[in-house]
Image (tube, rainbow, N blue to C red):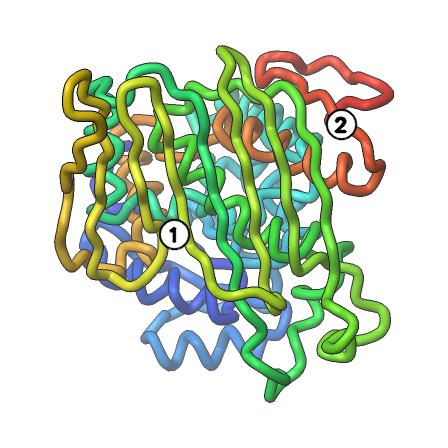
Amino acid sequence: MTTEIVKIGIIGCGVIGKLHIKSALEAPWVAVIAIADAYPAAARQAAEHFGIGRTYDDAAALLADRMIDAVVLAVPTNVRTELALQALEAGKHVLLEKPLAMSSADILRISDAAEKARQAFGPRTVAFCSSRFRHLAHAKAAAAWIAEDHLGDIRVIRCRVTDPSPGRPSTPQPYWRVHSEVNGGGIVSNWGIYDLDYLLGLTGWQLEPEWALARMWGLGEPIADYFPPDADTETYGAAYIQCRDRISLTYERGEFMAAPQERSWQIVGSKASLTLHMTWPSEKKIVASILHPETGVETRTIWEGNEDSSWVDKGALFDFTRAIIEGRPPMTGLVEALKLQRMMDAIYLSAKSDKPVQLLSVGDRATSKGGAAQ
């Protein structure tokens, strides 16, 4: 870029959109030029609250603003891809919220649009907010430790997070949260993309998923009325993913569970394993279990501290805008997003079909039929 200031527009002024506005205002290398929302009153209210000088009544008007270098798409999943395509056609850099897309076909369409934009305007940065938890201090320490080859050959990557039902909700769930045609799924889509980005990112994106086998369930019978009758999103999912190089990934996420709370992320290697805690509280201890030939397993704390949890909110935006200025890839770009989305597609397809599903490699753009995730 010819300037060290990235001029951005933010589309979507809901809870997440406001977090992006707040984060942008903390970054001296970012200027919020304009905001837009499908409900113009929401954009005007946010503009007044944050002191933003320009609002638009629709996304198309914001995308036509030539002063804007980059856009943040804090809108529902089912409309985000089309806006990303329009933004790239207008020459903008693009940051997309999570879930990443409705399917990997959407990621491929965005990738094609990014290539056309590169030819017309020069390289365009496309980044995804699924990287949020890798911006935390403990995650950076864990990634550095893994990169030093302390684990040996990775054998198993695990995530098991189950949250018990807290009782009857005081307010209804948002429409997007319980309808898959808007969000692409439920708890697995919403939180699984964070879990998978975190675990694959910490291990250097070396995993190459081959097969997935999954199951999903909705609310338990005693609490089925927590969601409206037409809700179709899952509240509990479990998956096994077989990867190249004899690596296995086991995954489990649940909410409103008839089970105690469990929160565990783990990477097991031939020489050592790492036990992690992706989310809150901010005070953490990251412990390695190291195999010793004489004494067995020795434990070692590789990082301990009270990390700044605000990086969960601002990390993706900071990384995106710095990537534009520095001309480098973002933490989660199109290549990583395609791998993640193909995993998600395979998990959902397997759960729906009750069959194992084969994943395409990231470099394979051919269309497969039968038990394959596109």
The quarter of the rendered structure image containing the C terminus is top right
The quarter of the rendered structure image containing the N terminus is top left
**Vertically, is 162 above or below 88?**
below
Assess whether mark 1 and mark 2 are in contact (beta carbons under 8 angstroms): no
Q: Is residue 293 left or right of residue 153?
A: left
Q: Residues within 10 Å of mark 2 (few under 14, many from 20)?
A: some
What is the number of callouts on the image? 2
Q: Which residue is mark 1?
A: 8
Q: Amino acid at mark 1?
A: Ile
Q: Which residue is mark 2?
A: 356
Q: Amino acid at mark 2?
A: Pro
Q: Quadrant of residue 227?
A: bottom right
On the image, the x and y values in percent for residue 211 come to: 66, 22
On the image, the x and y values in percent for residue 116 come to: 57, 23
- What residue lies at 85% left-to-right and 69% top-to-bottom? 230
Question: The residue tagged with tag 2: helix, strand or loop?
Answer: loop
- What residue lies at 66% left-to-right and 60% top-to-bottom? 235
- What residue lies at 46% left-to-right and 37% top-to-bottom? 158
- Closer to us: mark 2 or mark 1? 2
On the image, the x and y values in percent for residue 215 come to: 72, 44
